Amino acid sequence: MGAIRLHRVSVLRPFTDFLTDIGVSVDRGFHRAGLPVTALEDVNNYVPSQRFLAFVADMAQREDIEDLGFHVGHRLGANSVDPHLAGLLGQSPTLFQAILRFCDLANKTVSNSRMGLLQPPLSPQAYFYHRPSCDDRHPAIEQIGWFGLTTMMGVVDLFAGPHWQPSEIGLIQHHLPDRVIREQYPYTRFRLAQQQSYIVVENALLDLPPLGPQATATASSPFSYEPCSDDFPDALKQLLLSYIREKDLTMDFVADLCNMSTRSLHRKLAAFGTRYSEVLEQTRYHVASRMLQDPDTRVTDVAHTLGYTDASHFSRAFRRVAGICPKQYRQQIHH
């Protein structure tokens, strides 16, 4: 039974940072796409893929930035997926192992998106590929395609150097990239209408070690997060964490976030032996238990943040999950 398609907020953040830096406000774009205004507060949370893709397509069209995905990915390289990723990959002994590590992490960051390395037998070159989470008719396909390509090229740069360019780039789109992009890669051949995006990497490069100081400069930061889940109730909890401060988390509203009918959401959860109200209550408990660890946060503030009408209502809901009231929980963790 398929899970909800999600994008980690760390992939959304580079787009919002780029747009903000060029003077574009993203608040209205968030509203139009149905993204919560608090989404950026925790890059480890997840948002619905359809809402992320809608935001990217909308901002590219409204701001007339045809190559938005290219500029966002080109600016950050490997760190486009996570701000600490380049440092982690720089600890790999070879480019080959760095690519495998990158693909494993990237595939856990976005549902239904696949990155990998294809090595045809007897061929002198390999194909570092990206199959986006949206189909080739989606308005965001070019932006997401170029975002993935420039991120992958950033991984190779950590080992081959910043002046390396692929001999060939495969594109899902049916037309050549614009002049700005072509000028960045004057010696690269572009192949159009491919089933997936890819860059060609010569096999001889795969044994390269990292470029010392350049690759390890950010290696001190840990890279740890919860991958997007394939389990439907767990994926729903991951989605709810980003919307938990919304005032009216009705089942109808959340079903729409999941891109399905309310009846379908009910059936899917029933198949796992649970209900929407239970998943929502467990998610609120998860957030509440973290907030209560701060002794300066009042119980009434926790209740208000999580959408409860009053503190007593919140306390009863908390007790149903934890078996104790919020005050007792706080006393336990601080003693």
Image (cartoon, rainbow, N blue to C red):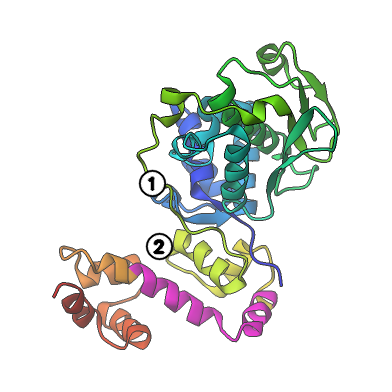
Residue drawn at point x = 72 percent, y = 34 percent = 142
Spatial CA distance of label 1 from label 2 is: 28 Å
From the viewer's side, name the closer residue of 4 and 251. 4
Q: Is residue 251 left or right of residue 244?
A: right
Residue count near mark 2 (Cα–Cα under 10 Å), binned few <14, some 14–19, many ≥20: some
From the viewer's side, name the closer residue of 98 and 268. 98
Residue 267 placed where, x, y %?
68, 81
Query: Residue 191 appears in which quarter of the rendering?
Result: top right
Looking at the figure, which quarter contains the C terminus?
bottom left
From the viewer's side, name the closer residue of 205 and 107. 205
Q: Residue furthest left?
A: 335
User: What residue is disc 1 on?
Assistant: 222
**Res 151 seen here:** no
Residue 93 placed where, x, y %?
53, 35
User: What residue is disc 2 on?
Assistant: 245
Main SS category, magenta section? helix
Q: What stretch is highlighted in magenta?
A: 264-287
Residue 296 placed where, x, y %?
15, 63
Give the foreground label among 1 and 2: 1
Residue drawn at point x = 58 percent, y = 54 percent = 108
Q: In this view, does 226 lie above or below 270?
A: above
